[in-house]
Image (spheres, rainbow, N blue to C red):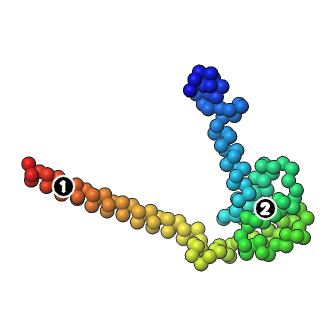
Amino acid sequence: MTDDISKIYLDEEQNLQFNDFYLEEILAETNSVESTPTFKYQAASLLEYALKKEKLLLEVRKSIDTGTVIDLIAFGLPNYVADKINIVTLQGTEDLYNELGKLEHFVGKNKYDKKDNIYSDNRSIKIEKENHAKFVSAKKEGYLTMQRKIAGLKRKIEKQF
């Protein structure tokens, strides 16, 4: 970079900045904006999900009507929960929170949407540990076979000389 350009875009510690914002701050803001509409319910309570989603939506856009907020929150809910909520009759987010509170017991019973998904958190941790152990043993076997091949090649080379 030329000296003029580096004076404009680099601070004293050589950090890249643009219009008094550092590059990391700009990237963090754009990532939160991109992920907000597609933020979906994962494992916490339904009320926690709804509050977090509403907070994210209001951070991105200060002037958003309640109908849109309700629709976007309901969009990320699991299908079996969203089917039980009549979104048309809801007047505000408080009504949505009341409905989600009534449906909270469905989340504990129905932890899966598909037959192949893991049914509980303990089982998923156990499977992760098993997969990690298999990976480590396969890597160790590959390493040992590679060492054997190298040792065999060394013996062949030594025999030739």
In the image, what residue type sits under mark 1?
Answer: Leu
Look at 83% across and 62% down and name the residue there.
70
Q: Quadrant of residue 110?
A: bottom right
Look at 66% across and 34% down and name the residue there.
22
> Which one is nearer the viewer's eye here, 96 or 45?
96
> In what element is the residue under mark 2?
helix
Residue annotated with mark 1: 153
* Disc on res. 145: none
Q: Give me the C-alpha separation between circle 2 and circle 1.
A: 63 Å
Q: Is residue 56 above or below residue 20?
A: below
Task: Point out the residue furthest to the top here.
Answer: 3
Q: Position of residue 38 (x, y in %)?
A: 71, 59
Q: Is residue 144 above or below residue 19?
A: below
Query: Disc 2 or 1, which lies upstream in sequence?
Result: 2
In the image, what residue type sits under mark 2?
Answer: Leu
Q: Is residue 153 visible?
A: yes
Is the C-beta separation of discs 2 and 1 under 8 Å?
no
Q: Position of residue 30 (x, y in %)?
A: 69, 46
Q: Position of residue 5 (x, y in %)?
A: 62, 25
Look at 13% across and 55% down and name the residue there.
156
Q: Residues within 10 Å of mark 2 (few under 14, many from 20)?
A: many
Residue annotated with mark 2: 72
Q: Quadrant of residue 99?
A: bottom right
